[in-house]
């Protein structure tokens, strides 16, 4: 079965610091999504990556998909308290199962002011 | 305007009861999903409907029955609730099966 592994599982950073979250798959990723979840709320779509080597940015968040399409990283520059939350990577199943997303276990980010 | 809305937001009930969660999306999407998030925050697909047709039915107890009266609604009915059903249930929608999914705020189900 296909699984996504995120690292680290949790992260505490000082405001203003940069950080990186990784998402690794044992199989080729078909459509890699990054979501953010705040406590008590739903998932907010951040970015979608499809092509090997692709990189996208939104404000201070940059996501990349490696050439082999088996690993993605999410980088936050100059972190702020508003970046705190749980970051989840998700990917479509390689078995073409009706568009379902398989998620990593999440990375909980805390930003200390 | 809420894009994907679920009701209720909180649901506390006794073991053995039957309950329903409703989901509506106003995005004009043709595909809707139910996910379950357990206490460890792990999110897993349960069901998916495309144009009111069931396309994904994961290994979910048949006590869980989804119903899609139209493209904009996907409800989840749960019979004979068990302690292990306690979780956060998320509804999501997308245009097509391989586009970003938009999530509701979740329904927190607690079984006493």
Image (cartoon, helix red, strand yellow):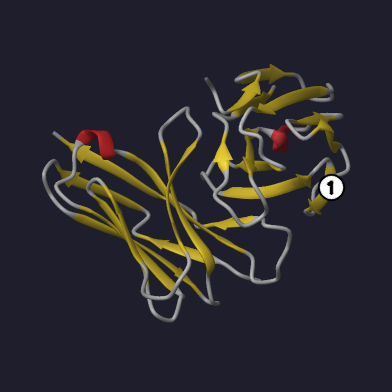
In x, y percent, where is residue A22?
35, 63
In x, y percent, where is residue A36?
41, 43
To which chain does the residue with label 1 belong? B
**A99 left or right, relative to A48:** right
In x, y percent, where is residue B16?
84, 25
Image-quadrant location for residue B17 = top right
Position of residue A80 relative to residue B60, above or below, is above
Look at 58% across and 30% down and name the residue there. B106
In what quadrant of the picture does the C terminus of chain B appear?
top right
Pick the front one: A5 or A47: A47
Look at 67% across and 57% down and name the residue there. A99
**A62 left or right, relative to A94:** left
Pick the front one: A32 or B29: B29
Position of residue A112 relative to residue B58, above or below, is above
Look at 65% across and 18% down and name the residue there. B8
Pick the front one: A67 or A8: A67
Q: Residues within 10 Å of mark 1 (few under 14, many from 20)?
A: some
In x, y percent, where is residue B81?
80, 29
For disc 1, the marked residue is B54
Look at 62% across and 27% down and name the residue there. B107
């Amino acid at each position: 079965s296909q699984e996504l592994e995120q690292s680290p599982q949790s992260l505490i950073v000082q405001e203003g610091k940069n950080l990186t979250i990784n998402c690794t798959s044992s199989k080729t990723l078909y459509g890699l999504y990054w979501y953010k979840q705040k406590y008590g709320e739903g998932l907010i779509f951040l970015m979608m990556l499809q092509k090997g080597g692709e990189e996208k940015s939104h404000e201070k968040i940059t996501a990349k998909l490696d050439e082999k399409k088996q690993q993605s990283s999410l980088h936050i520059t100059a972190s702020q308290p508003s970046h705190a939350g749980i970051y989840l990577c998700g990917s479509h199943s390689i078995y073409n199962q009706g568009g379902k997303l398989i998620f990593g276990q999440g990375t909980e980010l805390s930003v200390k002011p | 305007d809420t894009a994907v809305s679920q009701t209720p937001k909180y649901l506390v009930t006794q073991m053995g009861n039957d309950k329903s969660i409703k989901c509506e999306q106003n995005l004009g999407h043709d595909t809707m999903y139910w996910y379950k998030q357990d206490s460890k925050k792990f999110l897993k697909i349960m069901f998916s409907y495309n144009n009111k047709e069931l396309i994904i039915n994961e290994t979910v107890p048949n006590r869980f029955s989804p119903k899609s009266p139209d493209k904009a609604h996907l409800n989840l009915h749960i019979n004979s609730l068990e302690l292990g059903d306690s979780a956060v249930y998320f509804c999501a929608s997308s245009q097509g099966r391989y586009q970003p999914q938009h999530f509701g705020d979740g329904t927190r189900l607690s079984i006493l």
